[in-house]
Amino acid sequence: MGNADSDLVFQSYGRCCNNESFFIDFYDRFMGSSAEIRALFVDTNMPAQRHLLRNGIMQLVLHARGMPDTKLQALGKSHSRTGFNIRPEWYGLWLDALLATLRQYDPNFDDSTAQAWRRAIEPGIETIRGAY
């Protein structure tokens, strides 16, 4: 993945992540994608969950910028079948919800930004999903 992608993604995320509504709307969208996913969050402290999400996305972006995948390995372990049991097929819904929410909040977002996001964070998502 080129530096151009990771720079674009880093800037795109910066335009979105200081707005708490970004994370609220992401979870509304993600939970709206499946009753099973909605059920995962029934007893969740959502402000704390949004904080974890903010950090998790940043870890994916930092990995795209060359950081080691240590934190992503840990996320994989916590989300695996022995952890939160986040099934591999749900990651596609997660990414779709993320891209739709980025499109909503990043005024500079276009199809090439979406492609850069996919190229940048799919390897990190595979690291997490692969721990299942």
Image: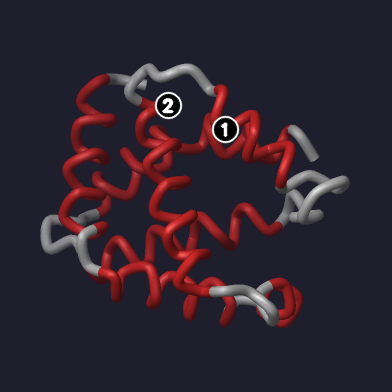
Residue 15 image point, x, y percent: 16, 55
Q: Residues within 10 Å of mark 1 (few under 14, many from 20)?
A: many
Looking at the image, which residue is at 57% across and 82% down?
Answer: 32
Front-most of 62 and 51?
Answer: 51
Q: Residues within 10 Å of mark 2 (few under 14, many from 20)?
A: many
Labelled disc at residue 72: 1
Front-most of 77 and 105?
Answer: 77
Residue 50 image point, x, y percent: 45, 65
Residue 7 image point, x, y percent: 20, 31
Residue 98 image-quadrant placement: bottom left
Looking at the image, which residue is at 64% across and 29% down?
Answer: 73
Say which element carries label 2.
helix
Front-most of 33 and 45?
Answer: 45
Labelled disc at residue 63: 2
Say which element carries label 1.
helix
Labelled disc at residue 28: none
Residue 124, placed above or below residue 46: above
Residue 70 image-quadrant placement: top right
Looking at the image, which residue is at 80% across and 49% down?
Answer: 83
Q: Are marks 1 and 2 in contact (CB under 8 Å)?
A: yes
